[in-house]
């Protein structure tokens, strides 16, 4: 496990950390039912991240 973590680049850890924070905030906002333009934009960005960025990130980690 430790060896796997060492293969992460700082950038990947940063992206992953940001994604976790973003997803957490999005869930909290969805629970409070205040869905305005900013939240819709953030949800859209989260979906884009999951479909486009994350597969790249996972591929980079495995290599």
Image (cartoon, rainbow, N blue to C red):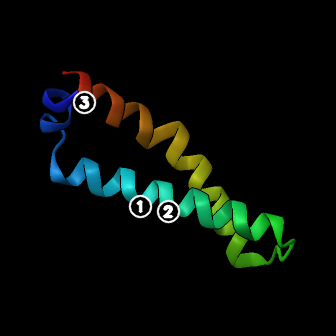
Residue 16 to residue 50: above or below? below
Q: Quadrant of residue 58?
A: top left
| Horizontal relation, residue 12 to residue 52: left or right | left
Residue at the image point whose x is 19% and y is 28% from the top:
4
Kindly identify which residue carries mark 3: 61
Which of the two labelled residues, at mark 3 and mark 2, occupies the earlier sequence position?
2
Residue 43 screen position, x and y as percent = 67, 59
Q: Which residue of the protein is positioned furthest toward the front in this rendering?
A: 2
Q: CA distance from mark 2 to mark 1?
A: 5 Å
Kindly identify which residue carries mark 1: 18
Q: Quadrant of residue 24?
A: bottom right
Nearest the eye: 21 or 11: 21
Residue 21 screen position, x and y as percent = 50, 62
Kindly identify which residue carries mark 2: 21
**Classed neighbour count for the residue bearing mark 3: other residues with Cα under 10 Å, few (<14), some (14–19), many (≥20):** some
Assess whether mark 2 and mark 3 are in contact (beta carbons under 8 angstroms).
Answer: no
Local secondary structure at mark 2: helix
Q: Quadrant where the C terminus lies?
A: top left
Which of the two labelled residues, at mark 3 and mark 1, occupies the earlier sequence position?
1
Assess whether mark 1 and mark 2 are in contact (beta carbons under 8 angstroms).
Answer: yes
């Amino acid at each position: 496990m430790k060896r796997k973590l060492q293969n992460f680049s700082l950038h990947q850890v940063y992206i992953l950390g940001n994604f976790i924070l973003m997803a957490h905030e999005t869930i909290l906002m969805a629970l409070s039912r205040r869905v305005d333009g900013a939240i819709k934009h953030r949800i859209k960005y989260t979906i884009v991240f999951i479909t486009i960025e994350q597969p790249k990130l996972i591929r980079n980690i495995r290599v």
